[in-house]
Amino acid sequence: MPSSLVKLPARELTPARALAMRVVLAMGLLAMIVAIVYFDREGYNDSQHPDRELTLVDTVYYATVTLTTTGYGDIVPATAPARLVNAVLITPLRIMFLILLVGTTLEVLASQGREQLRITRWRRHMRDHVIVVGYGTKGRSAVQTLISHGVAKDDIVIIDPSSAASSDAQADGLACIVGDATRRDILARAEVHKAQQIVVTADRDDAAVLVTLMARQSNGHAYIVVAVREEQNVDLVRQSGADATVTSSEAVGRLLGLSTVSPGLGHVLDDLLTSGEGLEVAERDALPADVGKSPQHLEDQVIGVIRRGHLHRYFDPAVTQVELGDKLIVVRSAVDLPWAPRPGAEPRERAEPVGGDA
């Protein structure tokens, strides 16, 4: 399978930069020989102009043909000191130039081989990762939220047909597949059959449906979240295999309406949707100290309880008491860990949550 469309995060020294450094070094060697010959130009003869002293152009010409070992023989060292300088200084510089030239070629070939090896190793170890289809505004925000909630960059793979978007993903330290996610081979390059979660942020709903359908056919257990532009397409996307959908146009329109009717409510909702500051919605495991209590009486502001895979509102009679194994949807300060004590709360023993943080 060709891997030219796979772009892993760039290293600090790129092949282009390494090549540029070698070009600068080669020009430095050339300038050094030009200076040596020019200052000792009286010791050289030009067979084409035997009665004329070498000019700067002549020395540049001589340095060039000497470094490249062309050696036309029209300009030669004639005196003993000039020949000694050629043997002691210019010949080693010529060897260094050849090593630099050959080394550059080998470096280009080796860098290609190393990149291929990196991609092969990446494919072999990539599993239980998150695939994000589309690195536009929605995709970028989704990635930032994933990272802020503890997902490692190495566990995120971007798929986007735009070279500019792939370059942005590389700059952000993410692996990227350049191509159309509606194609099965592109999804295969992202190791879709090993993915744990798939986020689809396509520009069009028909593309989102096709990506979701193909992803579900390749991976029956991954949790697929799809951004849908129009509410009328939600059922179609769910039938294609999506586990959850977010209607972007409807959500934005509702937020605009609420912000107009109640600016305060709009600010709160915007705060909840903004990561890293103010309020945040978090999911955490029920702690032993929470068991037996009503969701309304916990230190956290509980708004939902997930029990045996089903979501219940905090006022649902089915969850009047918290059970061990429940997951709690809470509104917390953005600076708090999901299981950290509330600021100002009475100190009490906090056990590590069962199963880790969400």
Image (cartoon, helix red, strand yellow):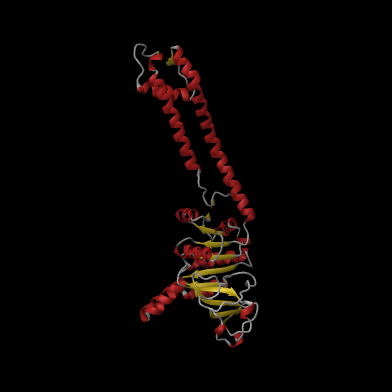
> Is residue 1 in view from this perspective?
no
In front: 175, or 341?
A: 341
In front: 289, or 7?
A: 289
In front: 165, or 211?
A: 165
Q: Quadrant of residue 294?
A: bottom right
> Is residue 347 in view from this perspective?
yes
In the image: residue 154, left or right of residue 274: right
Question: In the image as oriented, which residue stretches furthest toward the bottom?
Answer: 317
Name which residue lies at 54% across and 71% down: 237
Give the percent coordinates (x, y) of residue 30: 43, 28
Vertical placement of residue 105 versus 248, above or below: above
Give the tally of numbered discs: 0
Q: Quadrant of residue 222?
A: bottom right
Give the percent coordinates (x, y) of residue 165: 46, 56
Vertical placement of residue 271 versus 318, above or below: above
Q: Quadrant of residue 307?
A: bottom right
Q: Quadrant of the C terminus?
A: bottom right
In the image: residue 176, left or right of residue 27: right
Vertical placement of residue 193 versus 57, above or below: below
Give the percent coordinates (x, y) of residue 356: 62, 69
Name which residue lies at 50% across and 67% down: 206
Name which residue lies at 52% across and 48% down: 11
Question: In the image as oriented, which residue stretches furthest toward the front?
Answer: 347
